[in-house]
Image (spheres, grey):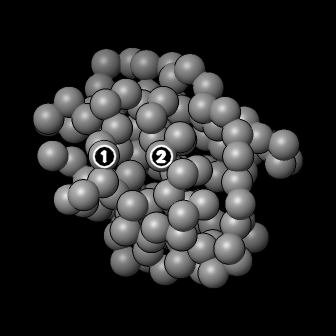
Amino acid sequence: MSGDEGHEPAAQPEDLGRFFMQRANAGDLDGLMALYEPGAVLAVPGRAQVAGKDAIRQALQRFLDGRPTISGESQPALRFGELALTSTRSAGGATAEVARRQPDGTWLWVIDQPRIVG
């Protein structure tokens, strides 16, 4: 199973955005981390990008420290083989991510740009 034990894996790339919103609203850092590949890259709004599990964990912890309440709608993914471009639209803007199909058929993000419009 991809991701961390106890967290439902993304069977489709569109699941990632929905899971992110649910887990962020619940303050579930481990659940958020289960959405990323170990070497993933995350753009941190207002800062430089970070890469790897440790740096992403720190950035997401800072995000969760603000006790966010987020809502939005995952858009249909654009797929190309083992890759998919995912996006979530919300009142605050939109996101863009690249997901990769894992050997077990589940999906994880490898690139995350949490704010492209807004």
How far from the left and from the top, in percent, is residue 67? 68, 74
67 with respect to 15 (left or right)? right
Q: Looking at numbered disc 2 in the image, what kind of residue is underneath it? A: Phe
> In the rendered view, would you say 105 is above or below 92?
above
What residue is at 49 percent from the left and 80 percent from the top? Answer: 58
How far from the left and from the top, in percent, is residue 25? 60, 60
C-beta proximity under 8 Å, tags 1 and 2: yes
What residue is at 70 percent from the left and 77 percent from the top? Answer: 66
Q: Name the quadrant containing residue 105.
A: top left
Q: Looking at the rendered structure, which numbered label has been put on residue 115?
A: none
Task: Report the label total.
Answer: 2
> In the rendered view, would you say 66 is above or below 1?
below
What residue is at 37 percent from the left and 77 percent from the top? Answer: 54
Identify the secondary structure beneath mark 2. Answer: helix
Identify the secondary structure beneath mark 1. Answer: loop
Q: Nearer the viewer, residue 49 or 3?
A: 3
Instruction: Tell me the residue that label 1 is attached to.
Output: 8
Q: Is residue 48 in sight in this rendering?
A: no
Instruction: Tell me the residue that label 2 is attached to.
Output: 19
How many C-alpha atoms fall within 10 Å of the one at disc 1: few (<14), some, or many (≥20)? some
Distance between the alpha carbons at the discs numbered 1 and 2: 9 Å
Q: Name the quadrant containing residue 34.
A: bottom left
Q: Looking at numbered disc 1 in the image, what kind of residue is underneath it? A: Glu
What residue is at 30 percent from the left and 54 percent from the top? Answer: 7
Q: Earlier in the sequence, mark 1 or mark 2?
A: 1
How many C-alpha atoms fall within 10 Å of the one at disc 2: few (<14), some, or many (≥20)? many
